[in-house]
Amino acid sequence: MHSLSSDKSQSWLSWSLRGVLILLFMVLIAKLIEVQVIKGSYFRNLSEENRIRRVVIPAPRGKILARGGEILTGNTEIKKRIEFTDTGGFTLSEDLTGAAEEEVITDYKRYYPMGDKFSHALGYLARVGENEVDKINPDCPEKGPISSDSLIGKTGLEEKYECLLSGTPGEEIIEVDASGYELRMLGKKDPVPGQDLQTTIDYGLQTEIANEMNGKKGAAIVTDTTGRILAFYSYPSFDPNIFINKGNNNEISSLLNDDNLPFFNRVISGTFHPGSVFKPLVSITALEEGAIDKNFIYNDQGVITINNYSYSNWYFSEYGRTEGSIDLTKAIARSTDTFFYTIGQMVGPDAIAKWANTFGLDSQTGIDISGEVKGLIPTPSWKELTKNEPWFLGNTYHMSIGQGDVSVTPAEINTYISAVAANGNLCQPRFNESLPAKCKKIGVSKQNLDLVKEGMGKACSQGGTAYTFFDFSERHGGVNVACKTGTAEVGTDGTPHAWFTFFAPADKPQIVATVLIEKGGEGSSAAGPIARKIADYYYASFAN
């Protein structure tokens, strides 16, 4: 017989067990509601993603072409097999053994057929940095976020025209089984190739200059008078293919640590004392300011002495001889330093700086690649502010022959000489053939420009400093060349920068070229022969 207390205890235990069962049942119901209703779409998506794989189809990058259609930068097709991973992703393998047709997609590898002959203008591709992943290029937002495995342009035309050249990847949607094997394709979106870039570069001329300058540290740029760039070269150079091909880390590191700076674009990023190629600008300044005219005559004595300081002419320093009575055209032809000391003193540094600014020698040219710097044209106020020193007459003399603190890029020199050739039409240099010419007329007298051009024509004739061009006219059907040599002292080792700039024909210019050999010696002997090769090639190959 059970006691009352025993019955009560059993009753309490029974109801407790029932309560626990009810609670567990309610928890189970709640969990089922969470899985099926509240998070149903989430788990369905997980299941779907495990069953469906999205494969990115690479898009070919647009080619970069020379003006004749030659490939400067192109793509090599590489067939790859899609291999799915256990983690829900995929890899692309070049092993196509046993691959079905639907398992193979086309990938692309960038290549640069000219190697190191055009690299500073072309630039190169590199994988995106961590801070660039999933970002959208504001210049082409329609192409979407940048993926972590993307290669994008880092310098040169590859960088400048990234939006034009880059394509939009496609996608395949593939259903797989539990083991990751493909069952069927559910859909496909084809990639959109990038657009080609047609440049103004002449393939043959570019190759010719690269071959001629190989081993000579410096820069060369060739344009027409509207700014189309026909050739563009900086040495030392590099092969952009090393950034595409694997296993070149040591070579890249070696180039990055090279004291000769092979990645440095000397055409637009290097500033150098211009020496005598600056003298046509000083001539224009003196003419435009009314300090001299075509009848001005100067009697060269070989040297000017001021307060026990002597400023001599190169002809006197090297040969002990003087020019005697000369006018402006002969002074340009003979590059007579004492003449330019004198007219520089007559107009003063601020006037020279004003006209240098007019011709763009202290500003970027506007070329359509990045990395350009601007030159420096000193003035008394600049010197006072920067060096806390007064301006002396000797500073004016040095400025008047392109020395002292005057410093410019080869691209700036070529652009200013092009404006002289084109009767005061100053144009931005450009690579993109589809860009219209962007020029402006500068306020300079055609009569004064003609006088300067006459002097530059004499520099390339018998008696001038550019002896490499003395026989050009007779060898090229009477075509006359206008030019200026430059030998710019630099540093303390006594080896100057060698410059040569020219345009041709002298009366109706089609081509403008500037060559700089860094610490190469005299302009006529170091840079002149390369300039002659440029002119010879142009008139032998494709001049109208």
Image (cartoon, rainbow, N blue to C red):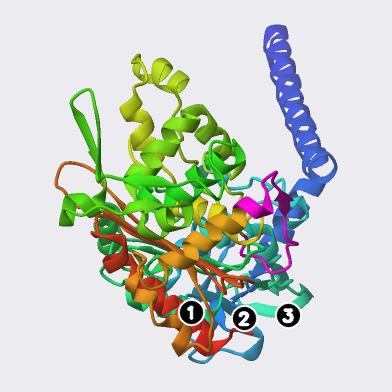
Give the residue at x 34% y 51%.
336
Q: Which residue is mark 1?
A: 205
Q: Which residue is mark 2?
A: 105
> What's under tag 3, amino acid-wise?
Arg
Q: Upstream in the sequence, badge 1 or badge 2?
A: 2
Does dot 3 land on a helix, a strand or a loop? strand
Which part of the image, by quadrant, shows the C terminus?
bottom right
Left of 399 or right of it: where is 44?
right
Q: Is residue 188 above or below residue 453?
A: below
**Neighbours of disc 3 within 10 Å: few (<14), some (14-19), many (20+):** few
- Where is residue 238 shown, x and y percent of the image? 35, 65
Give the residue at x 56% y 81%.
71
> How many numbered discs sit on the rendered protein?
3
Which part of the image, by quadrant, shows the N terminus?
top right
Q: Upstream in the sequence, badge 3 or badge 2?
A: 2
| CA separation in Å, label 1 and label 2 | 38 Å
